[in-house]
Amino acid sequence: MTVRTLLLTGGGLAALLASIAWAVTIGPADISTGDVWAAVAAHLGLGESTLTPLRDGIVWNLRMPRTLLAAVSGAGLAVCGAVLQSLLRNPLADPFVLGVSSGASTGAVAVVVLGVGGGAVSLSAGAFLGALLSFALVLLLSHTLGGSTDRVVLSGVAAMQLFSALTSFTVLTSADAETTRGVLFWLLGSLTGAEWGQVLLCTGVLAVVLAVCLGYANTLDAFAFGDEAAAGLGVGVARTRLVLLSATALLTAVLVSCAGAIGFVGLVLPHATRALTGSGHGRLLPVTALTGAVFLVWVDTLARTALDPQEVPVGVVTSLIGVPAFVAVLYRGRRRT
C-alpha cells in the first residue's frame, strides 16, 4: 500500500503540473507551453522573459492565478468533503453541509446589494464574515441539541435554509437587474478576476488545514467504527470533532469567499478517490487533494472556453458533471452491497 500510495501521489503531482501548464495555454490568445514556462521562470527570477508585455500579462496576471486558484479550490473542497464524510459518518456530507456556503452568499449579497460596510468591506471579506457567522450558528445549535453527528447535520441544514432565504429576499427586494445577474454569477461559482493575493491566501490556509487533518488521520480512521468505539480507543470525540469541523469550515469559508459556491467537488471526489486508495485517511487525503485540484483545473478551463466568448459559471459545470458521477457512485455502492 505504501508503494501504491507513492505511485498515486507522484502520478497526481505530475498530472497536476501538466494540467496547469496545458490549461494556461488554452484560450483566445495563442500561448504555447514554452511561453508559460518562460513567463513563470522570468517572474521567479530564473531568467529573462522573451515574451511581449501583452503575452506575459496574459500568462502571469490572468490565466496563471486563475488556474492555480482553481487547483487550490478543488483540492481544498475535496479534502473538506473527505474529512466531513468520515467525521459525520454521512456519505452525503460535503463542505457546504455546515451552512458555510449559504452564509458566505448572504455576506456577499449584503455587501454588494445593501452596501454593508460603506465600501470599506470587499465582496470576499463580506462572504468570509457571513460564512463564519453561519458556522457559529451551526455550532451553537448543534451544541444545545446534544452535539451528535446527526444534530450537526440537521443544524447545518437549518442554517443553510435560513441564509439561503435571507439571500433570496435581499436580492429580490433590493437589487436591480444588473446587480442580480452579477450576484447570481458569483453565487454559482466564478474564478473570474482571480488575483495572486487570493491564490496565496487560499494556498496558505489549505496547507495548514491539510496538515491538521493529516495529523488526525488515524483518529478519522477510528471514527469509522462510531463515536463510542472511537472513545474506547482513547479518542477525545468532542474535541476532535470541534477541531476538524472548525478547520474544514475555515478552509471552506476562505475558498467560497474567493471562488464562490462550487458544488459537488467535495461530495463526489472523495468517493471516487476511495476506490483507488481505500479508506485509510493517511492515503486518502493527499490523493483526494490532488484529484480535486486536477478536476477543477479542467472544469474551469471548460467553463471559460466552451461557449467563448461567454463564460459559464464553474458551479454549473461541476453540477452537470457531478450529478451523473454521483449517480454512478451510488449504483457502484449498491452493486457491492
Image (cartoon, rainbow, N blue to C red):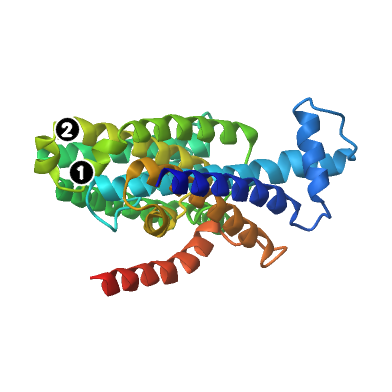
Q: Against 171, is 55 above or below?
A: above
**Residue matched to label 1:** 223
Q: Is residue 157 left or right of residue 55?
A: left
Q: Residues within 10 Å of mark 2 (few under 14, many from 20)?
A: some
The picture places residue 230, in percent across and down from the top left corner, at 15, 39
Q: Secondary structure at mark 1?
A: helix
The picture places residue 311, in percent across and down from the top left corner, at 64, 60
> Disc 2, disc 1: CB below 8 Å?
yes
The picture places residue 158, in percent across and down from the top left corner, at 23, 51
Q: Is residue 275 left or right of residue 160?
A: right
- Res 240 visible: yes
Q: Against 218, is 66 above or below?
A: below
Query: In this orientation, which residue lies closer to the viewer: 154 or 277?
Result: 277
- Residue at point 38%, 59% (across, down): 275
| Amino acid, disc 1 | Phe
**Residue matched to label 2:** 235
| Amino acid, disc 2 | Val
Q: Against 328, is 30 above or below?
A: above
Query: In this orientation, which residue lies closer to the viewer: 170 or 272?
Result: 272
Give the numbered dot on residue 31.
none
Decide which of tag 2 and tag 1 comes sooner along the chain.
1
Q: Spatial distance from mark 2 to mark 1, Cα to Cα? A: 9 Å
- Residue at point 38%, 67% (across, down): 326
Quarter of the image with the C terminus is bottom left
- Res 113 visible: no
- Residue at point 61%, 61% (across, down): 303
The picture places residue 272, in percent across and down from the top left corner, at 41, 59
Q: Secondary structure at mark 2?
A: loop
Q: In which quarter of the view is residue 64 placed? A: top right
